[in-house]
Image: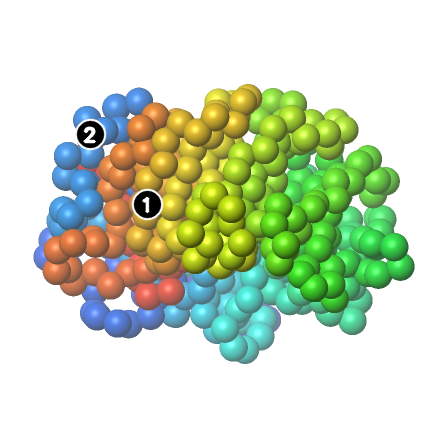
């Protein structure tokens, strides 16, 4: 562990006394409208969740005693990264600073500024002693000090990189120039590099997802009208193409592409096409096993009013039995993983910008800044943060993807910081 880190000043790293960590205090209320970066910790009472959340139903006001700590720094929507070896959470501020926080206390270990302006990334990846942030450029930081080890600029094939998967020793990046690369974590040397193509046209690469030994990437042609695209399955070790699935639109005028990350259950991989349908592919071959229909009614819909948009960007997560999928209008649908049968449907408070996070008996989704926990069996909303119904002093909004580690949930927000255990 890094017991000496709070006093580090080497190379311009801010010492720990520059932080503002507010421990639990009775009647402590955060100042309204002050932006913060926050990590929200919630103990997830898995099997007994519904019985234990009597004080956490939507509409209830959280007592100040529920909060453990709050660390105050202008925040962003980049999903935090977790370092299991050192029990550290990494988060990005709203002014492009990378922060290292002790996961159980919120104590700031170090921070490193790497640019200006609001960040435009999706996640933070940790591989051993290296922390990587994809924020148009890709940067690697030393996990123990925040020292910048390498910087891959957009001119070097990283343009537009937002999501960075890792296998623990290497990082995978995918740029808007269609270039997909595997990088050595310690120095960003390129281990392999491939470019996604459709005929002779370079595709934009989105949503790289590493599942076991396969890297899945969405390739999108934004020069076509409507947009078209394919799902690529690459061998993670070499970059060799394993299979490719070319999407086709359900109706004229709809896009035939994927943007977001895939998910896996057993021998199935699930992807969301932007026309609103959900596809279950064979993991090894890409063959389609089942297709779940769209839930919106686009122009030209023969079975509906046709008053909705052409496309519906849906984000998904899966476990052994279920696939949970969000929608642009806030609808959440749960499907049986093996068959695609709809198990339940509900409506959240707005669109989700990141995939759900699944825990035993729970799905956590950030709807337009509101973190909502759904019962996986019924779809019942168990709690919402911040409060939706009653006046509250808490103006926190959570926009990054929830991160679940054991029985702890981590969330970052634009305007609030909370560390909290659910009452049992």
Alpha-carbon span between mark 2 and mark 1: 23 Å
The residue positioned 69% from the left and 46% from the top of the image is 248
Q: Position of residue 307 (x, y in %)?
A: 43, 58
Mark 1 Cα-neighbour bin, 10 Å: few <14, some 14–19, many ≥20: some
Between discs 2 and 1, the one toward the N terminus: 2
Determine crowd level at label 2: few under 14, some 14-19, many 20+ residues with C-alpha closer than 10 A: some
Q: Is residue 38 visible?
A: no
Q: Which mark is residue 52?
A: 2
Q: Position of residue 377 (x, y in %)?
A: 34, 26
Residue 209, image quadrant: top right
- Judged from this view, the residue extending furthest toward the right is 200
Can residue 388 be seen at all in this image of the molecule? yes
Drawn side of residue 289 relative to residue 17, left or right:
right
Q: Mark 1 highlights which residue?
A: 347
Residue 67: x and y, percent? 22, 49
Asked whether, in this view, residue 148 is left or right of residue 422, the answer is: right
């Amino acid at each position: 562990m890094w017991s000496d880190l709070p006093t580090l000043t080497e190379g311009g790293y801010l010492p720990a006394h520059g932080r503002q960590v507010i421990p639990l205090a009775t009647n402590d209320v955060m100042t309204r409208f002050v932006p913060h970066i926050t990590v929200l910790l919630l103990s997830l009472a898995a099997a007994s969740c519904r019985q234990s959340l009597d004080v956490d139903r939507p509409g209830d006001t959280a007592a100040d005693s529920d909060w453990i700590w709050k660390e105050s720094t202008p925040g962003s929507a980049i999903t935090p990264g977790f370092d299991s070896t050192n029990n550290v959470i990494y988060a990005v501020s709203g002014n492009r600073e990378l922060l290292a926080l002790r996961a159980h206390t919120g104590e700031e270990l170090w921070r490193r500024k790497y640019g200006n302006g609001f960040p435009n990334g999706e996640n933070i990846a940790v591989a051993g002693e290296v922390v990587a942030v994809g924020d148009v450029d890709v940067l690697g930081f030393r996990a123990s000090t925040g020292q910048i080890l390498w910087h891959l600029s957009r001119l070097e094939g990283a343009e537009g990189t937002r999501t960075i998967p890792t296998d623990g020793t290497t990082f995978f990046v995918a740029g808007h120039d269609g270039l997909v690369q595997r990088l050595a974590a310690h120095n960003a040397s390129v281990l392999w590099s491939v470019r996604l193509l459709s005929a002779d046209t370079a595709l934009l690469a989105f949503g790289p997802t590493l599942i076991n030994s396969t890297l899945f990437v969405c390739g999108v042609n934004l020069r076509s009208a409507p947009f078209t695209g394919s799902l690529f399955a690459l061998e993670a070790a070499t970059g060799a193409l394993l299979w490719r699935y070319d999407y086709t639109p359900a109706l004229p005028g709809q896009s035939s592409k994927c943007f977001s990350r895939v998910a896996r259950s057993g021998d199935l991989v699930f992807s969301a096409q932007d026309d609103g349908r959900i596809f279950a592919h064979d993991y090894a071959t890409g063959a389609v096993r089942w297709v779940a229909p769209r839930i919106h009614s686009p122009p030209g819909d023969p079975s509906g009013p046709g008053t909705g948009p052409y496309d519906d960007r849906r984000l998904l997560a899966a476990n052994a039995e279920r696939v949970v999928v969000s929608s642009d209008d806030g609808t959440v649908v749960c499907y049986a993983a093996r068959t695609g049968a709809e198990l339940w449907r509900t409506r959240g408070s707005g669109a989700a910008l990141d995939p759900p996070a699944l825990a035993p008996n729970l799905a956590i989704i950030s709807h337009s800044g509101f973190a909502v926990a759904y019962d996986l069996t019924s779809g019942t909303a168990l709690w919402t943060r911040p409060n939706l119904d009653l006046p509250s002093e808490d103006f926190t909004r959570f926009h990054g993807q929830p991160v679940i580690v054991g029985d702890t949930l981590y969330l970052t927000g634009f305007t609030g910081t909370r560390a909290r255990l659910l009452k049992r």
